[in-house]
Each structure stands twice: as C-alpha cells, then as structure tokens.
C-alpha cells in the first residue's frame, strides 16, 4: 500500500485513517492490542512545509509528556550511547560500533564524489548486538538511504516496526533534520522523504486520541 501526500501532516492523518479503517487486529507479545497494516509506503513530497506540525499536535494532547523539538534533535544527533537504553540512534549513526561516523565519513563524501550513487546508506541494525533472542529491544528504524535526483536529496527510511501514532511524528522530524543537514553539506535542496514501514500499527489504547486528531 502506498500513500502519497504533499506534507507530513496530510500523510500522517491519511495513514492513521487507513489503519483505523483497514488494519488487522492483532495482539502482540506484550499482550497489547493494535490494528496493523504490513508494508505501508508513505511518500511526502514537501516535508519542509509542516514537518513539526504532527509533533505540535501530539504535545497539545497533554495526556503524556511528548518530547519537544530540541530533545528529539539531541537524542538523534548525540554520538554517545546511553546506559539507560538498549540502543540510541545517534550512536548508531555517528559512531557505529565505536568505529564509524556513517554521515561524515561515508554518506557525505560518497555523494560529493558521485552524485548519482545508489550506495549512500546508513544502517542502524547491528546483527552482532541485535540478533539475539534474549534482546528485549532493537532499532525500529533500521536503515536510511539517500539519493540525489534532479539536484535534490531524496531520503528513504525502512522501519521494521512503526507506531504510527506515537513514533512516526518524531521519526519523520528526526530524519528530516538529518536530510537537511546532509543536503546543506552538499549545497543542494532537500527533496522528498519516503518511509517504508513493515509493520505500521496503532495501539488500541490510543484509539480515542487518534479519532480526535482525525476529526480536526
């Protein structure tokens, strides 16, 4: 299933609506009930227009403390791993296996050398660490791909598990910040963002809030 919209707000609301109407009900290993659609592709043509709006909506609900923009940025760009979490995206991106800055040492130099390359990828899943049955958590966002097309930087993310209500607004904002940074280092504009979610789901306990957002 593919959803194409101009802005992140339009894409988010359409995806929430689609899952609520067509999602399959499942109960996961934590006994949480949700509605799920497999392999949803969401393409945002102009993410820069309202990239923060879904986060502002989440924060306005005031049912829980949703991270602000600065906190979301810091978590995603911080190179040091935290002992409080099984993993942090920043450490995987900028200090993979304590050995590689995937942005500064690979993606940016590669795109500068060969703007037509198909090899500009950031990998966040680490099989040696994550592929263990005993692991309780591993990265939901597993890969980010960058391509220069029509002199703009297009970005595609792959997510193994995607909480479309809580997680997606933060994820899309963080990916956009990374896209914008890389594009600025290349001297080009940002293009579209596409997310490929293997499991796009909404948990039953958020049904009331999702319906409220869709009514607005």
Image (cartoon, helix red, strand yellow):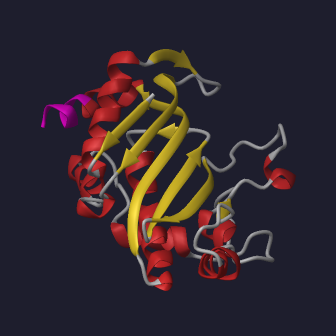
Quarter holding residue 86 = bottom right
Q: Is residue 24 left or right of residue 110?
A: left
x%, y% of residue 122?
66, 63
Quarter holding residue 71 = bottom left
Q: Residue at image x 37%, y 36%?
A: 3
Q: Residue at image x 63%, y 63%?
A: 88
Q: Is residue 50 left or right of residue 81?
A: left
Q: Is residue 168 visible?
A: yes
Label count reads: 0
Q: Is residue 194 left or right of residue 52?
A: right
Q: Residue at image x 30%, y 55%?
A: 55
Q: In this view, does 103 lie above or below 130?
A: below
Main secondary structure along the magenta-highlighted residues: helix
x%, y% of residue 143?
63, 54
Specify whether residue 31 is painted magenta. no
Specify whether residue 213 is painted magenta. yes
x%, y% of residue 97?
80, 69
Q: Is residue 46 above or below residue 167?
A: below
Q: Is residue 82 visible?
A: no
Quarter holding residue 90 = bottom right
x%, y% of residue 176?
42, 64
Quadrant of the image containing the C terminus:
top left
Quadrant of the image containing the N terminus:
top left
Please give the range of residues in magenta. Answer: 211-216
């Amino acid at each position: 299933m593919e959803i194409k919209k101009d802005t992140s707000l339009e894409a988010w609301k359409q995806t929430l609506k689609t899952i609520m109407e067509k999602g399959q009900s499942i109960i996961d290993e934590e006994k949480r009930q949700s509605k799920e659609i497999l392999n949803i592709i969401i393409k945002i043509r102009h993410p820069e227009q309202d990239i923060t709006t879904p986060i502002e909506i989440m924060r306005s609900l005031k049912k829980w403390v949703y991270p602000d923009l600065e906190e979301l940025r810091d978590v995603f760009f911080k190179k040091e791993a935290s002992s409080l979490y099984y993993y942090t995206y920043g450490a995987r991106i900028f200090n993979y296996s304590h050995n590689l800055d995937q942005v500064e040492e690979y993606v940016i130099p590669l795109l500068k050398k060969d703007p037509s390359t198909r090899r500009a990828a950031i990998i966040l899943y680490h099989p040696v660490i994550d592929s263990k049955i005993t692991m309780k958590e591993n990265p939901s966002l597993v890969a980010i791909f960058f391509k220069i097309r029509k002199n703009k930087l297009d970005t595609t993310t792959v997510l193994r598990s995607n909480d479309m209500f809580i997680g997606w607004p933060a994820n899309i904002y963080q990916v956009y910040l990374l896209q914008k940074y890389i594009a600025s280092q290349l001297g080009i504009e940002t293009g579209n963002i596409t997310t490929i979610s293997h499991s796009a789901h909404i948990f039953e306990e958020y049904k009331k809030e999702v319906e409220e957002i869709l009514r607005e």
